[in-house]
Amino acid sequence: MRRRLRGGFRAFALVSGIGWVLDLCLTMGLVQLGLSPFAGSLAGAATAVSFVYVVSRLMLLADRRIGRAQDFGIYVLWQVFAISAASALVAVIAYLLDPAIAAVGAGRASPVAGFNTITIASGLAKALVTPLTLIANFLFLGWLTGHGARMVSAGARGTR
């Protein structure tokens, strides 16, 4: 059972990893364009979790129906809460990291490839918050679909 659980989590982590890259790119791009770390994170995460939901349902759960409207409604409510909480945490961490990143970049034109220090701080903050959101979303999606065992089985088949 442990091996199957690890396999299911790995498959979910791979799908989530693709979503995370999308989230990170959108977050950093939007912050670089002037949005706050909270707003950038909110937009990036909302896009990414929609992607992860659809791909998880289609591939990991082999559920071509995408889910009942009720499931999606509950999922949306969960994500409104989870994304808001995670984005608030990203913003707090980004604002705490920003002065340190600015200090490291002092005397230089730019710390990294023309990004503002708050953009870099937002990316780092997103990376720090990700493990918490990954685990929470894996557990929630398994609970919501009632297919926790199917997620585990699908992942175990994909990792052998």
Image (spheres, rainbow, N blue to C red):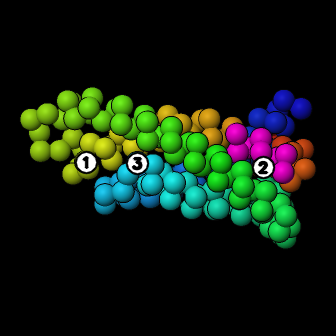
- The residue at the point 58 percent across, 58 percent down is 46
Q: Distance between the residues labelled 3 and 1?
A: 12 Å
Q: What element carries label 2?
A: helix
Residue at the spot 84% in from the left edge and 37% down from the top edge? 4
- Is residue 126 depicted above or below 43 in this figure? above
| Residue 131 seen in this snapshot | yes
Q: Any magenta on residue 142?
A: yes
Identify whether 63 is placed above or below 11: below
- Percent coordinates x, y for residue 93 in the rendering: 43, 34
Precedes in sequence: disc 2 or disc 1 = 1
Left or right of 102 on screen, residue 106: left
Which residue bears the numbered disc 2? 141
Q: Name which residue lies at 65% across and 48% down.
A: 81
Residue at the spot x=85%, y=64% of the render? 70
> 92 and 127: which one is in front?
92
7 over 100 or under it: above or below: below
Magenta-highlighted stretch: main secondary structure?
helix
Residue under pointer 3: 37
Q: Is residue 53 left or right of residue 129?
A: right
Dot placed on the residue nearer the N-terminal end, 2 or 3:
3
Which segment did they paint magenta?
Answer: 136-144
Judged from the image, the secondary structure of the residue bearing numbered disc 1 is loop
Q: Name the residue under label 1.
A: 116
Residue type of the residue flagged with mark 2: Leu
What amino acid is labelled 3 in the image?
A: Pro
SS class of the residue under badge 3? helix
Residue 157 spot, x, y in % from top left = 82, 47
Q: Identify residue type, mark 1.
A: Asn
Which image quarter is the C terminus in? Answer: top right
Q: Mark 3 vs mark 1: give the one in front.
A: 3
Q: In which quarter of the image is residue 25?
A: bottom left
